[in-house]
Image (cartoon, rainbow, N blue to C red):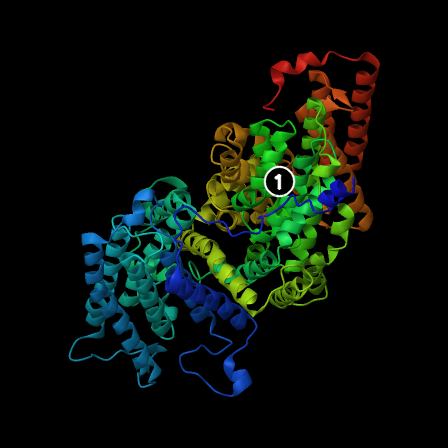
Amino acid sequence: MVQESTQADQAVIAEGVDDEPVEDNRRLFSGWRMQAVAGFAAFYALFHMAALNGVSISDYTGITVPLLPQFPMETWNFRVVHIAGALALGFVVYNAMLFSDSDDDAQGGIWGKIAYVLFLPALLALGTGLYFARLIASGTLPEMGGLTTWPAFAGTPIYSQEIWYFGVPLLVATGGGIVLGWLEKAPRDRFRVSDVLLALCGIAVAIYLIAIYGTAARNSVGTPFVPIGVAFAATAGSALILELTRRVAGLALVIITGIFLLYTFVAHLLPGILAVQSAYSWQRFFGHVYSDAGILGPTTAVSSTYIILFIIFAAFLQASKVGDYFVNFAFAAAGRARGGPAKVAIFASGLMGMINGTSAGNVVATGSLTIPLMKKVGYRSTTAGAVEAAASTGGQIMPPIMGAGAFIMAEITGIPYQEIAIAAIIPAILYFVSVYFMVDFEAAKLGMRGMREDELPKFNKLVRQVYLFIPIIILIVALFMGYSVIRAGTLATMAAAIVSWLTPFPMTLRGIAKAFELAGIMSIQIIAVCACAGIIVGVISLTGVGARFSAVLLDLAGVSQLLALFFAMCIAILLGMGMPTTAAYAVAASVVAPGLVQLGIPTLTAHFFVFYFAVLSAITPPVALASYAAAGISGANPMQTSVASFKMGIAAFIVPFMFFYNGSLLMDGTWVEVIRAGVTATFGVFLLSGAVQGWFMGQRAAWFIRLGLLAAALLMIEGGLVTDLVGIGAAVAAWLVQRLFQPDPNATIAVRGAD
């Protein structure tokens, strides 16, 4: 008996949740290559931490090192370096294609030799960029009308220099490197010449843009007078961003971006609201898109500050195995309940999802543990995958971190982050309560048990480690004490390192370096995605297509505001399908949110409306990234899993409409109004879950009972006093009918959803 007790005390359900996932196209270096890449990744993350907090070597030593940046950096330059570093690191780490066994013995061959030849134009472009930087730094260039006047060099006009010494060589090297990426092969633990070539091209773009953006380029953004070299650099930079996005996030976002790019150059030929008055030149467009109106705009502003800061925070938490603790804590707290592993998935995925910022990534991290356990206690493969997908998606709307969307929302709207986090509390509760009820009713219908005592970690033991929540508590407290998001995130990161000293995984200097390395690698995908979304934002801002969609919404609102909101919902979901949450919201906020604001909807409500549906695109058929990731683990059909996850998260599709009719759900009102709205909406979600699952008050419900519950739920969710009373009355009537007449539940067979 004592031995069994000891084994139970040592039971660890979650192991490896914090392990770094390795994608199928990611290189696995060894030896000096691993050390070089790890060092660069760690330096890249550390650079951001230092820049965001204004720390430099000269502050402490009084010595200025010419090759190292001095902080605070100029904003444009910082964002250019931010993207260039991700490009260089990303191309070296991620292969253009998935690896196969045959790649172990692969050689560069003829394609590798061609890549070496292409280093010549790449180095020429890089050298030209450095020459211009040196020329501008000399301070000898005259100005006329606020614009720098460029002299001829060696008898060649500067215009020709930009074309033949920089632009053409850069495009040749970039295009050749991308094509060779599909052809050249190399062992998984080796560098590819074409990838190093693309990294060099990304650096050349950055050096040129940093040099030129101090002069005429910023004054000519969006006009036909963009310097030709800037247009070349922006074209190459955009191509590099699209290629890296394809490698790390798949084709969906790349295809959508390509459609927007095509639209820019054919819009003058299109009819109706899509038309523009005149065609845009290549030079004008690309000079515009690589500016603060596009790639260097709000999406990169957020990825270079808040997002990478919280990626570093998440990396420090992973290094101290806090993720394992979160999942074990969820098992200890909820594992005994009926259908326990599914309820564990809700809690664990909510905690993990708000930190890691991606629905599909959260599914992979926690689902590899929870999905097999759900199947073990009786859930079908489809349902197990659906529960994990719905719960992981909800992590993106869980304050205080909310993935990364909250930070982009704060950047776009100008609303303080703290206000956004507070407003998200009730909607997040409604979402997770809904998924909980759906899971609980499913378990009740199937007669499931919870997990046994000996299958779970000891709650008393885990309570003694509750100090692992301290970094998140410090983050919340610092934010609400008025500290900036950057300062609060930095304090929380430092706390994560200190708290680790109380665990079996204390962070030494080597551990801290490893955490920075992990953060650098983790940041590649989100930076590429944000930059790619910036291209779409640039198209929207240049062509004004967003304003024309706003006009359509205004016209629809003249017929019905509900119809306009439904149209906005469809656009937000369509734009988000197949895209990571951050990019989905950034694009939808540019296209849909301005129209909602023009309808008279408050800015915060409009952006929350768009944000929620952008998040929910991850579980919306036919393209549901989170559901597909869960299906890959559960072994179920991906489309059936996406339909089932849509059903699990059905309440979230109603919650945004609740914002419109009842602002108290976003903490807009007195405490009495907020509490009443929260309580009645929660009861409404309970009734909605009962209607969808066909389970009410401990037994199956007949079809007309389900219809009554649905009507009562919608009345409760609407938020008015009269509708709340009518909804309560309808729910009581449904309960009395079920209790007194015991209607035959088999009548529901024809209308049951996927279980």
Residue 45: x and y in percent read 50, 65
Q: Residues within 10 Å of mark 1 (few under 14, many from 20)?
A: many
Which residue is at a point 46% across and 60% down the rendered structure image?
297
Q: In the drawing, does residue 126 fall left or right of residue 273?
A: left
Of residue 664 and residue 698, the one placed in the foreground of this image is 698
The residue to which callout 1 is attached is 391
The image quadrant of residue 12 is: top right
Q: Considering the numbered disc 1 on the image, is that residue within a helix, a strand or a loop?
A: helix
Whether residue 250 can be seen here? yes
User: Disc 1 marks which amino acid?
Assistant: Ala
Residue 510: x and y in percent read 54, 67
Residue 373 position (above or below residue 607): above
> Which quadrant would the C terminus be assigned to in this image?
top right
Q: In the drawing, does residue 470 fall left or right of residue 38?
A: right
Residue 714: x and y in percent read 70, 31
Q: In the drawing, does residue 658 fall left or right of residue 408?
A: right
